[in-house]
Amino acid sequence: MEPDTSSDQRPVIQAREILAKIKRGEDVEYDYKVIEGDLDLSGLDLRTEKVSRTKRELRQGLSEELKVVTSKITIINSEIRGKVNFSNTHFLKTVSFREQRSFRRVQFTDDVDLRGAKFDRNVKFAGVIFNYANFMRTKYTGKANFSGARFKRDVYFTESEFIGEANFQQATFGGKARFTEVKFGGNTNFLLAEFTDYAGFGVAQFGGKANFQQVTFGGMVWFLGVVFRGDTDFIETKFKGDTHFIKAMFCRDNKFMDAQFGGKADFLEAKFHKDADFMGAKFYADIILKRLKFNVLYIDWISIKDNLVYDGPAFLALIKNFKVVEQFEDADDCEYQYRKKNQDQKKLYDNENGWDWSKFLDIISWISCGYGVRPLHTVFSMFGVVFITSIIFLGYFNSMFESFYFSLMTFTGGLMMFTGGEPDILAPERWLRTLAMIEAILGYLLMALFVVVLARKFIR
């Protein structure tokens, strides 16, 4: 809960007092204070160091000279009622804005600008409340702790570099969060973080483990071209909007168990070099796996079958994958849907190309054996042939029983007619004998097909 500052009894410190200490190189340590005025280092006469900047960086307001701050800055359980401008600054010692008491947080009531800042030691913004905050192109040599931080409005970490550990555990982002082109050198922790709006990690690089476990993404998530060099953890993560992992590269093991994808999940041209575990994940909209490359994929077919957007290679790779991980029923279901969708897309006849015999053969394969993965299709086909021919024969026999008996004997043992056997009943007319011969041949073929399909199901 945020403090009620209307009756705030904390001592008031003027920002110029802090700036004077920084100018003299003295450590800044304040606890339980209200700081009035702007903390703007741009006007201080400090030693500077030269850095090289690109034209783009210069257009973004970054300078080729960094002001060097030798003071250790520790401000805890306080409120800063003014703008904070630490941009283009090199901090040689620890900078810490954090809470220590659960009932009060460090709060910046105005904009915070740290563009181009460089921190040589650990940085702590744990529990801090920000409005608009700009950390673009900042560099963190030590640990960067933003755990429990609350960003009310947009926050920019674009093109920043975290050499050490980056901790955003339980941080909340009320506006757009931009981590585009950020380099995370060490482990990165976003455990239980919450993103209300857009979250952009495009072309970011994660050198260590990336922990996004139980994160809630309320808006669109953009992981375009991201490289995860360590293990990734998206267990129980909630993606409420569209999620884009287009051309993302996962170099180590990946866990998406029990994740929820409320919007589109786009893995177009993504690459999983190691195992990827999606067991228990739920997809409520399209999942795009076109040109996806993976080693082993653990996923339930039932969770993706209704929303899968595919191409041929991706589907065939899925079928092979299900066999590798011994999910044989999933492999059969996947193959059946792939063949059925291909059949549905074909036209039996069109004016330009005439008859499409491949469509005809697909229909026969579907009805007779379910593309080789449905034995029951063969059973129903055999029963259908016997039943239909018994109806045709009915007018030439005394009862339905005799007609069905003749049809069944013809289907199951009709080849005896052509090998010297004598059946009990003979068709009275020539065309009926021709029909019986056709039924006998179909019986031989369908029974052989049934044995093959059934054996395929049990012997693997």
Image (cartoon, rainbow, N blue to C red):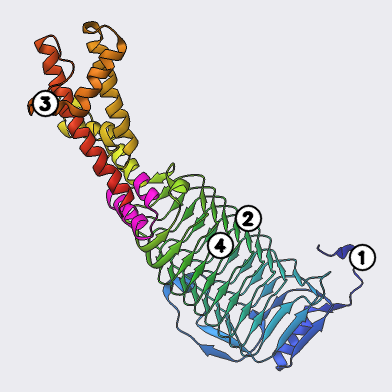
Which circle, 2 or 1, is nearer the viewer? 2
Q: Is residue 194 left or right of residue 158?
A: right
Q: Upstream in the sequence, badge 1 or badge 4?
A: 1
Mark 3 belongs to which amino acid?
Answer: Gly
The residue identified by callout 2 is: 196
- Which residue is nearer to you in this view: 450 or 331? 450
Q: Upstream in the sequence, badge 1 or badge 3?
A: 1
Disc 4 from disc 3: Cα separation: 67 Å
Q: Is residue 311 visible?
A: no
- Which residue is nearer to you in this view: 443 or 156? 443
Disc 1 from disc 4: Cα separation: 43 Å
The label shown at residue 7 is 1
The label shown at residue 235 is 4
Question: Given contact means CB atoms under 8 Å apart, are the residues at marks 2 and 1 in contact?
Answer: no
Mark 4 belongs to which amino acid?
Answer: Ile
Mark 2 belongs to which amino acid?
Answer: Thr
- Which residue is nearer to you in this view: 417 or 123? 417
The residue identified by callout 3 is: 421
Disc 3 from disc 2: Cα separation: 80 Å
Badge 4: how crowded within 10 Å, few (<14), some, or many (20+)?
A: many
Q: Quadrant of the C terminus?
A: bottom left
